[in-house]
Image (cartoon, grey):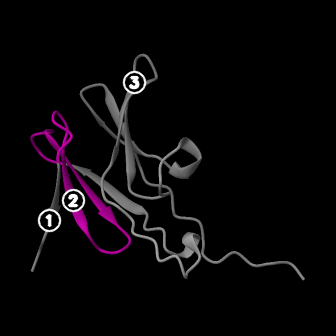
Amino acid sequence: MEEQAKRRAPKPVEPVEINNIRYEVIRAAKSRGFEQNGGVIAAVDIAKDEELWTLVVYQTVYDQNEEQDVQDVYITKLIPSQDKKTLRVENEAHKSYLVNLSSHEVLEITEK
């Protein structure tokens, strides 16, 4: 019998372009050396098609008694601010974060 996947693959997230830089979600981040699959973004110089930086927006804490793939939390949306200085990152756990695009600082948004 064939083993079934534990969960569906995450839906692709539209990249965001600001001032000739494309901000995109890194899919399967573990394959690039990160400790988790979800929650990682990259900034890419559009003209040079060169990655400028990567950032872990939030940490995924894995329970060693559960399979890791079902615990991954993926980014669902990237939204630029009106002033183009921050990027709102939303994930499938319904959490939101603001990424300062110049300092790379991350702030979790707590909404009531």
Above or below, 32 against 47 in this view is: below
* Residue contact between numbered discs 1 and 2, judged by CB atoms under 8 Å: yes
* Residue contact between numbered discs 2 and 3, judged by CB atoms under 8 Å: no
Task: Identify which amino acid the numbered label 1 is placed on.
Answer: Ile
The crowding category of the residue bearing disc 3, from other C-alpha atoms within 10 Å (few below 14, some 14 to 19, many at least 20), is: some
Residue in front for this viewpoint, 67 or 93: 67
Q: Earlier in the sequence, mark 2 or mark 3?
A: 3
Judged left or right of residue 59, residue 2 is right
The crowding category of the residue bearing disc 2, from other C-alpha atoms within 10 Å (few below 14, some 14 to 19, many at least 20), is: some
Query: Farthest residue in the right direction?
Result: 1
Task: Identify which amino acid the numbered label 2 is placed on.
Answer: Tyr
Q: Which mark is residue 46?
A: 3
Res 89 → quadrant: bottom left
Q: Earlier in the sequence, mark 3 or mark 1?
A: 3
Quadrant (top left, top right, bottom left, bottom right) of the N terminus = bottom right
Between the residue at mark 3 and the residue at mark 1, the CA separation in whole angstroms equals 29 Å
Above or below, 55 against 38 in this view is: above
SS at mark 2? Answer: strand
Please name which of the two marks, 2 or 3, marks the residue nearer to the observer: 2
Q: What is the total number of numbered labels drawn onto the structure image?
A: 3
Q: Which residue is mark 1?
A: 109
Residue range (magenta): 81-105
Residue in front for this viewpoint, 57 or 111: 57
